[in-house]
Amino acid sequence: MLLRRFYDDSLAQASYMLGCQRSGEAVVVDPGRRPEPYLAAAAEESVRIVCVTETHIHADFLSGSRELARVANARLLLSDHGDEDWSYRYLDEDGARPLRDGEEFSVGAVSLRVLHTPGHTPEHISFLVTDGGVSGAPADGVRSSPPPPLALLSGDFVFVGDVGRPDLLEVAAGETGTMEASARQLYASLQRFRELPVHVQLLPGHGAGSACGKALGAVPSSTVGYELLANWVFQCADEDEFVAKVLEDQPEPPAYFAHMKRLNRAGPPAPPDRRLERADLHRALSMRHDGWTLLDVRTRAQFAGGHLPESLNVPLTRTLPTWAGWVVPYDRPICVVVETEGQVRPTTELLLKIGLDDVQAFHILSDPAASPELGAVVVLDWDEAERARIEEGAVLVDVRGKIEWDEGRVPGAVRIHLGELSVRVGELPRDRPALLHCRTGHRSAIGASILAAAGHPDVRNVEGGWLDRLARGMDVER
């Protein structure tokens, strides 16, 4: 049996290839948007991808199942569970095989049994994997008893140390009144997990850093037995305790989750293949008047030193998809602003993962001092921030999440989550400086660009953020 794990640390997302080396066949589960990594792995392992499937309608990335099935000439298999609002809309169009609880499909000697495990989403399924070609099987393939299951591909059902959050349909997709019912569905699904043999490996769809849960472990895999002992969800005394705990302290879901849900439900489009325009300074400056989004992916220090007016700053790091998904609109063409041309492709590839496909141009801004038309952001430390609050009446804006705020905050600060800044900018007085802070200075720099782009006349970023304030021993509230 072949088992390959593909991990995308920009999304904290795992996909899997399982294959039978004897038959030369393989299945891919929960593929990312680009098919190339799976095709390359199949060629390397001398197997052919004959099936592509996924555990549920994803919210955090644009699924690659449809495209991989097309280019590999493979059969697409999708959950046939879920209500009318949250079930796949393109099953018939693509000739996909609908999967129901208890059904099995195989690639050679490797079989996958479908378990309907709703809770995170109504249509969610998991796959119980059995290797029929395990060592010790009779040469003629006849057994007196079936081989034991090997692993559970759990998607967003059970993670290492956590479970998939059951509130996304309500808080991200706007399905009012669904979170408690989903939590109770999840509890019922967990009783099926308890019944699995303790030796079964757990291969989840996400790791630490994903917003699809609140306490995901960084360990890539586990076992049913270990999770029954160590995962907090199995320590709850009853259903009501579980429901209360699983719904509390969930992080704010990124704004783009609802859009991903709709696209993945309707049928995710193929990645675009376009040649980008290289925009000079004059052209780039004019774009803001023509409805473009100027996305500056240089470092926050470079952005603060000089940037195109009305541009948004989301630095090119592994978290670019998450924060771009919070702040970049999907209905406008995008021009990415970079320091070097070599940053263009990594940027567009990260944006593609969440369906920000309309990148049409790039601008290289390597010498901000060369143009007097550029804007700047004042960067200050905590001593300077406190002076500005006293002497200028500056407003301190905390852009962290609610959980972080509840754990500790600066006296007198107001909290506006980074993802809400663009719609709540009117709450901040324009005749007083706005001082932004987060945990380290990264998110607040993004927030400073949002306020500046929205026309706030005096925006400043507190470098070092909450951690630096603690290190200085300055006053905080808890």
Image (cartoon, rainbow, N blue to C red):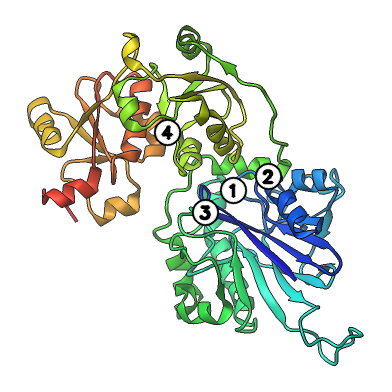
Question: CA–CA distance between discs 3 and 4?
Answer: 18 Å
- Residue at numbered disc 3: 12
Q: Earlier in the sequence, mark 4 or mark 2?
A: 2
Tell me the amino acid under the disc marked 4: Val
Tell me the amino acid under the disc marked 2: Asn
Q: Is residue 105 above or below residue 329?
A: below
Q: Earlier in the sequence, mark 2 or mark 3?
A: 3
Tell me the amino acid under the disc marked 3: Ala
Instruction: Check contact, mark 4 vs mark 2: CB within 8 A.
Output: no
Residue 185, position in %: x, y? 60, 67
Q: Earlier in the sequence, mark 3 or mark 4?
A: 3
Residue 206, position in %: x, y? 55, 59
Instruction: Check contact, mark 3 vs mark 1: CB within 8 A.
Output: no
Tell me the amino acid under the disc marked 1: Ala
- Residue at numbered disc 2: 264
Q: Residues within 10 Å of mark 3 (few under 14, many from 20)?
A: some
Q: Earlier in the sequence, mark 2 or mark 1?
A: 1
User: On residue 59, which mark appears?
Assistant: 1
Classify the position of the C terminus by image quarter: bottom left
Residue 447, position in %: x, y? 35, 33
Q: Earlier in the sequence, mark 4 or mark 1?
A: 1
State left or right for residue 425 relative to residue 31. left
Q: Is residue 243 above or below residue 48?
A: below
Residue 8, position in %: x, y? 56, 51
Q: Earlier in the sequence, mark 3 or mark 1?
A: 3
